[in-house]
Amino acid sequence: MTVIPRIPLEKSRSAEDIMSAILTNRGFISEKEMDAFLHPPAPTLDYLVKNAGIPEKSLRKTAELLEDAIKRGKDILVFGDYDADGVTATTVMWRTLASMAQGTDARVLPFIPDRVRHGYGLSAAAVQDIEDGTAWKDTVYPDFSPKLVITVDNGIVANQAVAMLKEKGVTVVITDHHLPDKKLPTADCVVHTTRTSGAGIAWIVAMYIDKESAVAKSLIDIATIGIVADMMPLTDVNRAIVTMGLRLLSRATHPGLKSLYDLSGMTGKEMTTYDVSFGIAPRLNAAGRLANPLDALRLLCTTSVESAEKLARIIEGHNKERQALTDTAIEQALSGRFPHNIVVIDSPEYHEGVIGLVAGKIMEKVNKPAIVISIRGETAKGSARSLPGIDITKLLRQVPDIFTGLGGHAGAAGFSLLARDIPELKHKLYALADKIIDKKLLVKQVAADIEITPRQVTFSLAHMLHSLEPYGMGNPKPRFLLRDVRVLEDRKVGKNGNHRKLVIENDGITKDVIWFNGEAAHPLSLIKELVGTVEVNVWRDRETVQLVAQHVEI
């Protein structure tokens, strides 16, 4: 495999030149554009209204409806979702409205649907539990009867459920970032944009309805978790929110976050998007995947240190169970052969809460679209993940009259069907995928921003790259290509010796390389191509600049 960098080698480039080339390649041409990206503006309400793609009239209408409901002492329901974006969006909206309702007769409760009982989003089953009181029997308000429902991170396609609520005289406000159908639900107000996540929208609404109060402003850290967890592009409005939100996450005083940090080894860290993506978000997701998503919501809402510590331990247990279930399912799945252009596997042993994770891992390993199906009695649920250029939802929709439910977008999809129809689904999907998927799309691509030499791997460059953070979708960490380097030292490191510490050399310049899970024969003597990131490593108060390898070709 030959890696073609987006920017070719120029040995004379300085650190400043490399930074400028990377920014230019990412679309920032003028100095003004570069400066605006490197120094994002503060996410004030004025900035948010102008840049989030939400019509201000919908924000104004939402504020009027909520203020009227609070003034009249109505019961208000915040209807969320069970993933990290949905839970954080629910936290932001509930904590804001509960603060606004203090001293009034208005009561505010959150509701997170159960993955198995209610399915995704504002469903008919969830509305039934809300209306007959089943949802409130174990709450502080068993007689709760919402007269206004505001959704967060869902509802934009819930036509039937919204109609059911409207028939009962309930005011409905939808806030969502998912793609709408041709016909919108008959809600009283719709707040929609695809520029940020459900939690991002919830925070913008909170800032607007509570007039940028201290409570609303303080919730930017919770919104940041949702934006990063939902893999929103970290540019424009998201970059402005997340840049400030990470600062607050780093010095969090909320008992829920502090307890989560303590159990996951993040206490005292300067938070990055990596910590959110691989530390905080998986733990919040684990509650909704395997158990009760309300555990995650309570963790982010409680003011009790004792409750926070107890909930954090519960969630940490869920996360470890999630990891075990995922690892077992992946190991089992990868033991098979995959001769077709798409992978479809099913088992009654797969927990439906982790099939999306398993599908994603299989896709990464075999570089083919992957579908994993969990069988529960006579019914089954599937989750799909796909590669760039292969619209998995469009592909699934070409298999008619087999799904009892199907939704998603180009890169991911979820569906339900009868277990007896799985063999037919496999047969049709294999034939379809083998016919229409171009095998060129299944060739693994290794991307690099720019080709450099070891001489150009400097502290100056590493520190400059830091200004590109926060990294994420739309703004990945820059990857560098080095060619034809000698390996002077190759040591196995780590508890099980599955990582490698290399010393490479070219043109008389040596650099350290850390290669996690390096699989090449040991020891290496020559590397044809190395793709990695430039980092500052701190060990015993000593700083060194090193490369972290993602791809090695010998």
Image: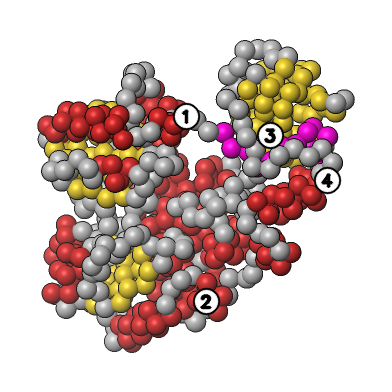
Which mark is first along the chain, 2 or 3?
Answer: 2
| Residue for badge 4 | 14
Indicate the position of residue 257 as horizontal and vertical percent values: 52, 54
- Which residue corresponds to mark 3? 481
Magenta range is 446-459
Checking the image for residue 3, the label placed there is none
- Cα–Cα gap, marks 2 and 1: 42 Å
Disc 1, disc 3: CB below 8 Å?
no
Task: Please state which amino acid type lies under the numbered disc 4.
Answer: Ser
Q: Of label 1 and label 3, which has the lower sequence position? A: 1
**Magenta region includes residue 397:** no
Place of residue 473 in the rendered image (x, y in percent of width and height, measured from the top left): 53, 50
Sequence-earlier tag: 4 or 3: 4
Please name the residue shown 39% across and 74% down the image: 97
Q: Are marks 2 and 1 in contact (CB under 8 Å)?
A: no
Give the residue at the far right of this rendering.
508
Residue 499 appears in the picture as rendered: no
Q: Residue under label 2, please give it.
A: 50
Horizontal side, residue 206 vs residue 433: left or right: right
Label 1: which secondary element: loop
Q: Find numbered disc 2 in the image and state the secondary structure of the residue it sits on.
A: helix
> Residue extending furthest top?
522
Local packing at callout 1 (Cα closer than 10 Å; few below 14, some 14-19, many 20+) is: few
Kindly report which numbered mark, 3 or 2, lies closer to the viewer in this rendering: 3
Q: Nearer the viewer, mark 1 or mark 3?
A: 1
Which residue carries the number 1 mark? 443
Is residue 294 toward the left or the right of residue 473 in the image? left
In the rendered structure, which amino acid carries the disc numbered 3?
A: Leu
Residue type highlighted by circle 2: Lys
Question: Which circle, 2 or 4, is nearer the viewer?
Answer: 4
